[in-house]
Image (cartoon, helix red, strand yellow):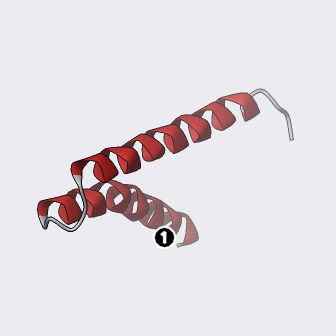
């Protein structure tokens, strides 16, 4: 139930973070630089989440 909903929302958010700027650039509503800035910020966010996940793997709750 909730686990599958969380996976769906995470996937939709990740795809939207890539697709929305690309669609806006294709429509001519934003410049290429703005699209690449958004892609860079998404990459930094993903790296941060992966580092946090790796750092918390060793902790015992």
Q: Position of residue 15 (x, y in %)?
A: 33, 57
Say left or right for 15 vs 5: left
**Residue placed at 13% from the left, 67% from the top?**
27
Q: Is residue 30 above or below residue 38?
A: below
**Residue placed at 86% from the left, 41% from the top?**
61
Q: Position of residue 57 (x, y in %)?
A: 72, 31
Q: Quadrant of residue 59?
A: top right
SS state under label 1: helix
Say left or right for 61 vs 38: right
Query: Observer-nearest residue: 58 or 21?
Result: 21
**Residue placed at 53% from the left, 44% from the top?**
45
The residue that label 1 is drawn on is 5
Q: In which quarter of the image is residue 36?
A: top left
Query: Observer-nearest residue: 61 or 28?
Result: 28
Query: Observer-nearest residue: 59 or 36?
Result: 36
Query: Observer-nearest residue: 1 or 31?
Result: 31
For label 1, the crowd category at 10 Å Cα-Cα, with few meaning under 14, some 14 to 19 and many 20 or more, is: few
**Residue placed at 40% from the left, 55% from the top?**
14
Q: Is residue 8 above or below residue 22?
A: below
Q: Where is residue 34 in the image (x, y as percent from the top left)?
A: 33, 52
Say left or right for 46 vs 22: right
């Amino acid at each position: 139930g909730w686990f599958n909903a969380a996976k769906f929302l995470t996937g939709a958010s990740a795809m939207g973070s890539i697709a929305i700027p690309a669609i806006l650039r294709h429509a001519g509503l934003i410049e290429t630089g703005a699209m690449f800035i958004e892609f860079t910020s998404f990459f930094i966010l993903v790296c941060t989440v992966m580092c946090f996940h790796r750092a918390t793997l060793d902790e015992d709750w």
